[in-house]
Amino acid sequence: MELPFNEAGVSVTRTALSAAGQVFPLRDIDDLRIVAGQRKRAVPIALSLIGVALAAVGGAYGSGAGLACGVMLVVVGWLAWIWQEARHQLLVVTGGESREAVWSADLAFLERVEQAVRAAKGVSATGATRTDASAAPPAAH
């Protein structure tokens, strides 16, 4: 049996989506949705503002230690901003209930998973209609 998609612990076959120890049969999947996460702003901004204030107070009072600590906090705030990753989720809707199937920092990966599941559902749907049509008795003339 050939896997249409198998990458980073997520596999999509003609019958199921398997991810993170969960198996979702394709016949039970009503819809898929990607929720794009955003970077958190509060911690990096707070660190940077505290650092700016500390550096200003250290500079005003001639304290090299205060100035250095303030500059270091600004740098830590900047590093916290650039190193954090947004968490994106692929939600599977089954029976009217949304469940998280996969999360990743790579939005393109989740889009590939979604396309693979939709393609597998399309193949299984056309295969089911062909099976139903071939099972029907021939029409009598």
Image: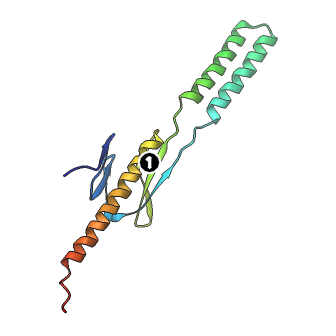
Q: Is residue 96 above or below residue 87?
A: below
Label 1 is placed on what type of residue?
Glu
Identify which residue is drawn at 26% across, 69% down. Answer: 128
Instruction: Please tell me whether residue 105 is drawn above or below residue 15 in the rendered image.
Output: above
Q: Nearer the viewer, residue 11 or 102?
A: 11
- Badge 1 element: helix
Q: Residues within 10 Å of mark 1 (few under 14, many from 20)?
A: some
Residue at position x 58%, y 24% from top?
A: 79
Which residue is painted at 25% across and 71% down in the image?
130
Q: In terms of depth relative to the viewer, which is nearer, 51 or 105?
A: 105
Above or below — where is 64 with respect to 76? above
Task: List the residue tagged with mark 1.
Answer: 111
Where on the picture, by quarter, is residue 51? top right
Q: Residue at x 22, y 50 (%)?
A: 2
Q: Is 61 on the left or on the right of 131, as rendered? A: right
Badge count? 1
Q: Based on the displayed image, in which of its 4 quarters is residue 118 positioned?
A: bottom left
Colour convention of the picture: rainbow
Residue 25 spot, x, y in % from top left: 30, 60
Q: Position of residue 121 (x, y in %)?
A: 34, 61
Question: In the figure, is residue 43 to the left or right of 84?
Answer: right
Q: Position of residue 111 (x, y in %)?
A: 44, 48
Asked if residue 86 lies left or right of residue 45, the reply is left
Q: Position of residue 74 (x, y in %)?
A: 66, 21
